Image (spheres, grey):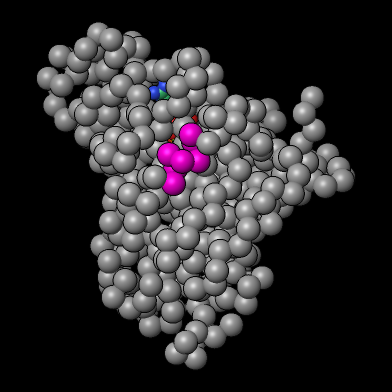
Amino acid sequence: MRSASDKPVTIGLLGGGQLGRMMIQAAHLLGVRVVVLDPDPHGPAGQIADQVIVGAYNDPKALTELAACATAFTTEFENVPAASLRFLAQYGPTYPSADCVEIAQDRRREKAFFQKAGAAVGPFLAVTHDQDLRSASAGLFPAVLKTAELGYDGKGQAVVDDPQSALKAFYQFNRVPCVLEKKLALTQEVSVVLARSAGGEIAVYPVAENVHRNAILDTTTVPAQVSAALTDQACQAAQRIAEAMGYVGVLGVEFFVLADGQLLVNEMAPRPHNSGHFSIEACATSQFAQQVRICADIPLGPTTLKFPVRMTNLLGDLWYPQGATGPIQTPDFTRFTQEPGSVLHLYGKSEPRPGRKMGHVTQPWVQG
Ligand SMILES: Nc1ncnc2c1ncn2[C@@H]1O[C@H](COP(=O)(O)OP(=O)(O)OP(=O)(O)O)[C@@H](O)[C@H]1O
Ligand SMILES: [Mg+2]
């Protein structure tokens, strides 16, 4: 594929993880090249990229090199330096924008933004000083203290029962800015992945139902077993959030469902989302293909669900059958590969670690 300037369409991708790898797989099916900038040339994305520029995400020399060889820019991880996206945006379309990524990078900014966009969030308190926790309302406990920045897969989080234990956790986090969220009794968790083009067209994926284990996504099942009203509410809230930000790209929005049917926004991810991996096999157009289409200025594809589906994450723990201190043993994946319709994705990470996402499996889902 060639761009308007007759250069081959090439996406400059910041980040070298599994989301980048799956984006490259989708790009190649659309005749689009991908150049990865990452400190590690051998990561999941680097292994299959058309070119890898080895460097830090904020290295001016590496960014200048990336700017010169790509026609559009994107990222596959949330904590990308916003300044790097701003720099690249001078050279070509950059989706998502630095402004949107900055909102998602700080839980305080993110929650304030959700509220402004008319999407309800659970009770929380922004925490900067010890005093914030000392005077926290008793009604917030038990609570989850989360670092405002840089958390993922439950990292930078502590469940706390009272102000005293919250203070202890705050000190363990080196007193970086945090949010203290009321620990809610969740009946379900759902997410909405959507794609929004530069022209403002939106394609929404079917609502996904997520089960977490130790604060890490375990399974995603689609369609979510929730009422039609709740499905509508989640889709509309996600669209409102994308529109209010002027967001361009693929966006994942996570929600909590409470016993009384209330739907609250948890957080968003300005990139393809783990709970959208099912779309590779089960939807007419995958979330990764949409991100590529948006960057390459190809119209969005349909998001129609082809069959009910379950995605299961494969964590590094599977490589340690005798526990985290035992020897590493490559798991036997034949139970997935032999099952008709089941698709195994391994991300090519060299080092399995407990809790690390090593791959996932997608299987047709029969309600049982
Ligand atoms: N306030 C809360 N009340 C109840 N459960 C919660 C709360 N906050 C988080 N959890 C549980 O922990 C999980 C992870 O939380 P959260 O999404 O905030 O973390 P994260 O580290 O940003 O994860 P990721 O980015 O991998 O989705 C949630 O999906 C939910 O299961
Ligand atoms: Mg989350």
In the image, residue 85 lies in the stretch drawn in magenta: no
Q: Position of residue 105 (x, y in %)?
A: 32, 46
Left or right of 10? Residue 350 is: right
Residue 138 is drawn in which quadrant? top left
Left or right of 79? Residue 225 is: right
Residue at (42%, 66%) from the top-left corner? 198
**Magenta stretch prevailing secondary structure:** helix
Residue at (79%, 24%) from the top-left corner? 368
Residue at (66%, 46%) from the top-left corner? 278
Q: Position of residue 242 (x, y in %)?
A: 39, 50
Q: Is residue 164 above or below residue 241?
A: above
Number of marks:
0
Q: Is residue 268 above or below residue 347?
A: above
Residue 348 is drawn in which quadrant? bottom right
Quarter occupied by the N terminus: bottom right
Q: Position of residue 107 (x, y in %)?
A: 30, 37
Q: Position of residue 200 (x, y in %)?
A: 42, 61
In the image, the segment drawn in magenta is: 233-239
Quadrant hosting ligand 1: top left
**Residue 139 in view of the camera:** yes
**Residue 16 in view of the camera:** no
Q: Is residue 61 above or below residue 345?
A: below
Residue at (34%, 61%) from the top-left corner? 97
Q: Nearer the viewer, residue 339 or 175?
A: 339
